[in-house]
Image: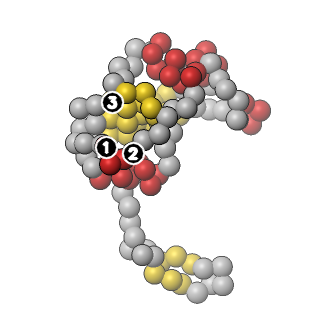
Amino acid sequence: MTTYFVSRHSGAVAWAAEEGIVVDKCISHLDVQTIKQDDVVIGTLPVHMVAAICSRGGRYLHLNIELSPELRGKELTAADMRACHVRLEGYSACSDHSFDLMRVDGNAVRAE
């Protein structure tokens, strides 16, 4: 089992270290093809990547943080993150291509 922490933000990496979260690899980009059964991925990834992680037998922990609008886009320190109630929450997802999508013109199309 490998634990990955996916982030481009030094404050997030510092927060994880200060919290005692054991991480095997800190990376700025995840290639989901590297995920194996029982691997753990921590980050703020889009749902399609979470679904890919889960389909490969991995576990995803989302780095949730309550950011005010004025803090969005700013680099935060570990202390800033704590002040914004940062926490890890587990999520799972799966792809479902069986539903109908609606086009702008109102005609239903089958998702592929």
Q: Residues within 10 Å of mark 2 (few under 14, many from 20)?
A: few
Q: Quadrant of the C terminus?
A: bottom left
Compare residues 85 and 60 and report the one nearer the observer.
60
Q: Residues within 10 Å of mark 3 (few under 14, many from 20)?
A: many
Q: Are marks 3 and 2 in contact (CB under 8 Å)?
A: no
Q: Which three-letter amino acid code belongs to the residue tagged 2?
A: Asp
Do we see residue 35 in this rendering? Answer: yes
**Mark 3 vs mark 2, CA separation in Å:** 14 Å
User: Residue at the spot x=58%, y=21% of the render?
Assistant: 11
User: Residue at the spot x=46%, y=81% of the render?
Assistant: 110
Circle 3 is placed at which residue position?
3
Residue 24, above or below 70: above
Which of the 4 image quadrants contains residue 78? Answer: top right
Q: Are marks 1 and 2 in contact (CB under 8 Å)?
A: yes
Left or right: residue 19 versus residue 70 is: left
Circle 2 is placed at which residue position?
31
Look at discs 3 and 2 and give the one toward the viewer.
2
* Location of residue 38 in the rendering, given as x and y in whole percent from the top left corner: 24, 38
Residue 1, above or below 47: above
Compare residues 24 and 21 and report the one nearer the observer.
24
Left or right: residue 32 versus residue 68 is: left
State the mark number for residue 34: 1
Secondary structure, mark 3, is strand
Secondary structure, mark 2, is loop
User: Earlier along the polypeptide chain: callout 1 or callout 3?
Assistant: 3
Q: Which three-letter amino acid code belongs to the residue tagged 3?
A: Thr
Secondary structure, mark 1, is helix
User: Residue at the spot x=41%, y=48% of the render?
Assistant: 50
